[in-house]
């Protein structure tokens, strides 16, 4: 690992602990102690991952996360003392990739960092064009049938059937049962 990681944590002891652990794992950490400092570093830093606290001086962690998502797609692991479900759901909606509550285990954090970095490198190797989704004609018929209907739950059985036109009769790699915007 030789990835550049931004640590945004206002507690100097935690920031140092994270920095030492990441250095020991072969990463190049850079520390920021406020949301404002992180906002200045993110656009020019070329970071592979961000570890972000939420309760920061200057800009809040949520504001930093919004800015990070607006400018790039760097993975963000939120490290916070907030444990309520609403905060976690709001952060997922903002675009955080992982959430760890304080107090935390350093080994677990390092494992999550490695997992996020592995996902990024796998994506970089394959690229979006190589990812395919197999959809059979019946799924489009179901989606057209459900579009415009009320939001109450409907089953796929209610939709009109279309004969399966796949000659090899193998099951598709992925089935789409969620709402499609066609």
Image (cartoon, grey):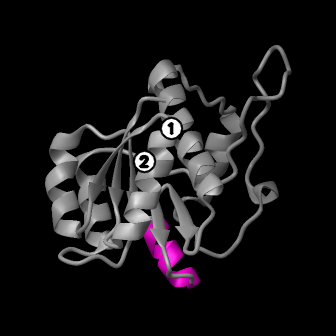
- Give, as a single range, the part of the protein colored magenta: 84-92
Q: In this rendering, would 81 be left or right of 51? A: right
Q: Which residue is mark 1?
A: 117
Using the numbered discs, state the Cα–Cα distance from disc 2 to disc 1 in whole angstroms.
8 Å
Tell me if residue 102 comes above or below residue 138 in the rendering: below
Percent position (x, y) of residue 178?
A: 64, 54
User: Which residue position is annotated with label 2?
Assistant: 75
Occupied quadrant, residue 18: bottom left
Q: Please determine whether, in this image, residue 67 is positioned above or below residue 173.
A: below
Q: Taking 84 as reference, is 32 above or below it?
A: above
Residue at x-position 29% and y-position 76%: 56
Q: Residue at x 52, y 74 (%)?
A: 88
Can residue 95 be seen here? no
Q: Is residue 88 magenta?
A: yes
**Can you give x and y, in whole percent of width and height, for residue 39 in the image?**
18, 59
Q: Secondary structure at mark 2?
A: loop
Q: Nearer the viewer, residue 107 or 112?
A: 107
Q: Residue furthest right?
A: 169
Residue found 15% across the figure and 42% down from its top: 44
């Amino acid at each position: 690992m030789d990835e550049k990681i931004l640590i945004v944590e206002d507690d100097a002891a935690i920031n140092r602990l994270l920095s030492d652990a990441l250095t020991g794992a072969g990463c190049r950490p850079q520390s920021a102690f406020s949301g404002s400092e992180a906002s200045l570093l993110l656009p020019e830093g070329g970071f592979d991952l961000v570890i972000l606290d939420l309760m920061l001086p200057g800009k809040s962690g949520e504001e930093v996360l919004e800015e990070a998502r607006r400018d790039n797609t760097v993975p963000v692991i939120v490290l916070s003392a907030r444990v309520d479900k609403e905060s976690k759901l709001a952060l997922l909606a903002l675009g955080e990739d992982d959430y760890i509550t304080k107090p935390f285990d350093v080994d677990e954090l390092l494992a999550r960092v490695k997992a996020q970095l592995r996902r990024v490198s796998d994506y970089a190797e394959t690229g979006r064009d190589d990812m395919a989704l197999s959809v059979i004609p019946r799924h489009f018929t179901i989606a057209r049938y459900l579009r415009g209907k009320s939001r109450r739950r409907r089953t796929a059985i209610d939709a009109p059937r279309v004969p399966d036109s796949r000659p090899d009769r193998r099951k598709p790699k992925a089935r789409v049962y969620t709402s499609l915007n066609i």
